Amino acid sequence: EAGVTQFPSHSVIEKGQTVTLRCDPISGHDNLYWYRRVMGKEIKFLLHFVKESKQDESGMPNNRFLAERTGGTYSTLKVQPAELEDSGVYFCASSPKIAGGYTDTQYFGPGTRLTVL
Amino acid sequence: AQSVSQHNHHVILSEAASLELGCNYSYGGTVNLFWYVQYPGQHLQLLLKYFSGDPLVKGIKGFEAEFIKSKFSFNLRKPSVQWSDTAEYFCAVTGFQKLVFGTGTRLLVSP
């Protein structure tokens, strides 16, 4: 079974440019999560999709970040325009359908390291 | 709001030494608890998890953790570490769906 994949693995862009990160969850997983780790800090939640719907986007930093999950399969996270403080590692995770409202194990992708110069 | 505290940011041990990494969380309701590990150059992977039942949970590679509800703790242990355990370890908690992580502990095991 293929794991969670993310593309690209690294991205270096200049301030003001746009970057789009992609995540392909494990096939059949309804739940898809985005997290970010800024250097030296903890991994922080950004948002959660259930199929194609945004269940919780309370962690999105601001309106420069736009996440989509068309068709309930892969997801993209666009940063436009990128700022220096957006640098970090962006992780995607997926988990199976939740039972009883509680999350099951989340399986993580390798992450995308974003550097904004 | 939920929060997780990992007491040790960097730990250096010799092979065969015992390991205990501290994790305390703050949350008033029912929680699910996790330890994830990230080996150099690899992605985050699950070491073990606690949802309910026996508070002493065993994970992969000889790791175990004990949930002590009264202390809001979920410490990770391993009786004898190996060089291959060099990695970063993350404690995480979820009360509903999103994971809340601690800052991570970098473990270096010297041969």
Image (tube, coloured by chain):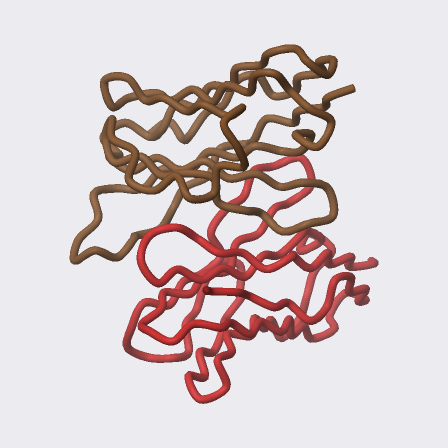
Chain colours: A brown, B red
Q: Is residue A77 left or right of residue A80?
A: left
Q: Residue furthest front?
A: A63
- Depth check: give the residue in front, A62 or A114: A62
Seen in the image, is A46 located left or right of residue A10?
Answer: left
Side (left or right) of B92 relative to B87: left
Residue B23: horizontal and vertical position, in percent?
58, 71
Determine the residue positioned at 32% across, 67% down. B51
Can you say whether A14 is above or below A57 in the image? above
Q: Residue at x 46, y 65 (%)?
A: B2
Q: How many marks?
A: 0
Is B28 left, or right, of B46 in this rendering? left
Q: Tell which of A77 and A89 is nearer to you.
A: A77
Residue A38 in percent (x, y) is at 67, 40
**Quarter of the image that includes the C terminus of chain B:** bottom right
Q: Residue at x 38, y 46 (%)?
A: A106
Quadrant for residue A73, please give it.
top left
The residue drawn where x is 63% and y is 51% is: A42
Residue B24 vertical placement versus B43 (above, below): below
In the picture, residue B12 is in which quadrant? bottom right
The relative height of residue B23 versus residue A31 in the rendered view (above or below) is below
Furthest-bottom residue in this view: B70
Image location (x, y in percent) of residue A41: 68, 49
Taking depth in this image into account, of A27 and A74 the one nearest to the observer is A74
Furthest-top residue in view?
Answer: A17
**Residue A78 spot, x, y in % from top left:** 50, 19
